[in-house]
Amino acid sequence: MRALVYIGPDQLEVQEVTAPVPGDGEALVRVKYAGICGTDLHLWHGEMSAVRAPVVVGHELVGEVVEDTTGQYDAGQRVAVEPLLVCGTCLPCRSGSSHVCRTLRVQGVHADGGAAEFLRTPTHRLHPIPDGLSWEAAACTEP
């Protein structure tokens, strides 16, 4: 599949990469739209020391479920992806503040993101998109 990959400061390349395969508790999402925000610009310019190249960029994205290993979502379900990868066990996670998880990682920054044809992501980080909302508008939600 094609993906936009951060190679190093001021270096992004469209590359052919291996398509992801979802594991237990994960879904495979066909990406429809991925946004670009200020974080992406800082990443591109090498201003984020936590980023380790190569990494597929893109943390603001929407798409449709291709496969869900949990059975929660049907194929074709429109979803917005919450890009936070959290442990679920530290005190902040257990207290409902997973956005400050002690091992927080963000897809598109610390792990492969959505500027690609497909994304593998935890199913509990998917949010259904209402039928009346366009793909373009939904891409701006960043849940």
Image (cartoon, rainbow, N blue to C red):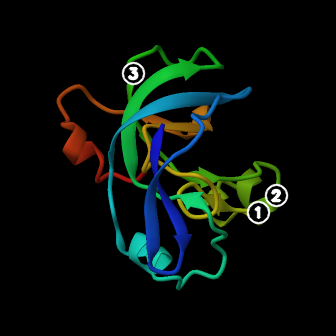
In-front residue for pair 113/131: 113
Where residue 56 sits: x, y (%)?
53, 55
* Above or below, comparing residue 1 to residue 60 in the picture: above
Pointer 3 and pointer 2: residues touching (CB < 8 Å)?
no
Q: Which residue is mark 3?
A: 77
Q: Which residue is mark 2?
A: 90
Where residue 115 sits: x, y (%)?
42, 50
Q: Residues within 10 Å of mark 3 (few under 14, many from 20)?
A: some
Instruction: Name the kind of residue labelled 1 in the image.
Output: Thr
The answer to which image quadrant residue 62 occupies is top left
Instruction: Name which of mark 3 and mark 2 comes first in the sequence.
Output: 3
Q: Which residue is mark 1?
A: 103
Q: Residue at x 60, y 37 (%)?
A: 18
| SS state under label 3 | loop
Q: Residue at x 65, y 19 (%)?
A: 70
Q: Residue at x 61, y 34 (%)?
A: 20
Where residue 23 sits: x, y (%)?
72, 28
Instruction: Name the kind of residue labelled 2 in the image.
Output: Cys
